[in-house]
């Protein structure tokens, strides 16, 4: 579903020029007024979605925010988690040596592949949501793991937003014969690629992990995609092609 969410950048390039054209040609508004009135459409959509989330979504795994300190029905109170936040580098994994069958040596790969039948959802349902202290928040925010995640998103989703914001103008400038609406349709293709390629990237990543049992293999795949996409964008910018297919 993440790919469908990201496709909004492409859908916008289809919908907004169409709304603008309709206001100009069908409603008789001037261009300087039509583009302002067109924003009523995304406003309505955003408000409807926000109300839907407010009325139908749970605030926390335990339900309402006011009930966050109460264990779920059927949940185990001894599995609750104290309000102590550890950065990934300081997390230790306790092993119960009494359950180890010494006759059958365990093959341990990365943490991601280990499972004892308890899902993250099961754990979350029995948690108490405790507000972290300022010190704990700062420790997590300045951790290398947080910075790495920020960098990955800045280089991927951040780049996508930057490209989406300028792509329509790029097509209209480089190919004046397209006009505003058709330039928007060409730009929409970039955003709609998310529907296919974002899930595909995750599927390939899962297949790589299934074969190698190594999280590092997935990291290498992610780095490769980032470098390849960056090189492609630089090549397009330097060459400044004048053909629509490019």
Image: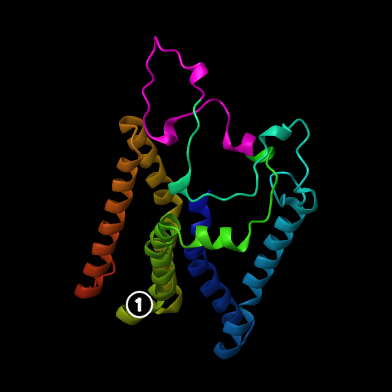
Q: Is residue 182 visible?
A: no
Q: Residue at x 41, y 12 (%)?
A: 102
Which residue carries the number 1 mark?
170
> Residue 124 location, x and y as percent?
64, 40
Q: Quadrant of the C terminus?
A: bottom left
Q: Residue at x 69, y 69 (%)?
A: 44
Is residue 110 shown above or below 88?
Answer: above
**135 is within the stretch colored magenta:** no
Of residue 226 and residue 9, the one placed in the foreground of this image is 226
Q: Residue at x 41, y 65 (%)?
A: 154
Number of disc labels: 1
Start-end of magenta stretch? 96-123
Q: Residues within 10 Å of mark 1 (few under 14, many from 20)?
A: some
Provide the major secondary structure of the magenta segment.
loop
Q: Residue at x 26, y 58 (%)?
A: 227
Of residue 108 and residue 174, the one placed in the foreground of this image is 108
Residue 132 lies left or right of residue 191; in this view the side is right
Residue 246 lies left or right of residue 165; in this view the side is left
> Residue 177 location, x and y as percent?
34, 79
Is residue 29 shown above or below 116?
Answer: below
Given the current orientation, which residue lies at the most extreme top position?
103
> Residue 57 location, x and y as percent?
71, 51
Q: Which quarter of the picture shows residue 37?
A: bottom right
Is residue 179 shown above or below 55?
Answer: below
Of residue 16 and residue 91, the one placed in the foreground of this image is 91
Of residue 29 and residue 238, the one placed in the foreground of this image is 238
Is residue 184 shown above or below 153?
Answer: below
**108 is within the stretch colored magenta:** yes
Snapshot colouring: rainbow
Given the current orientation, which residue lies at the most extreme left position?
239
Secondary structure state at the residue bearing disc 1: helix
> Residue 113 location, x and y as percent?
43, 31
């Amino acid at each position: 579903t993440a790919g469908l969410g990201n496709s909004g950048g492409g859908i916008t390039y289809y919908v907004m020029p169409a709304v603008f054209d309709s206001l100009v040609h069908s409603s008789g508004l001037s261009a300087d007024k039509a583009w302002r009135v067109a924003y009523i459409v995304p406003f309505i959509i955003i408000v409807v979605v926000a109300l839907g989330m407010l009325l139908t979504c749970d605030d926390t795994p335990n339900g309402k925010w006011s009930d966050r300190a109460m264990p779920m029905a059927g949940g185990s109170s001894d599995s609750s988690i104290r309000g102590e936040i550890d950065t990934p580098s300081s997390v230790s994994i306790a092993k119960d040596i009494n359950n180890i069958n010494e006759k059958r040596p365990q093959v341990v790969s990365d943490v991601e592949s280990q499972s004892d039948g308890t899902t993250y959802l099961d754990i979350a349902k029995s948690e108490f949501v405790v507000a972290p202290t300022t010190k704990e928040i700062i420790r997590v925010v300045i951790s290398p793991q947080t910075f790495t995640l920020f960098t990955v998103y800045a280089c991927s989703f951040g780049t996508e937003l930057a490209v989406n914001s300028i792509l329509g103008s790029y097509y209209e400038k480089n190919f004046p014969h397209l006009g505003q609406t058709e330039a928007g349709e060409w730009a929409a293709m970039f955003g709609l690629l998310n529907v296919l390629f974002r899930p595909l990237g995750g599927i390939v990543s899962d297949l790589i992990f299934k074969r190698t049992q190594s999280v590092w293999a997935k990291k290498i795949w992610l780095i490769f995609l980032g470098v390849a996409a960056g090189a492609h964008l630089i090549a397009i910018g330097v060459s400044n092609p004048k053909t629509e297919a490019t």
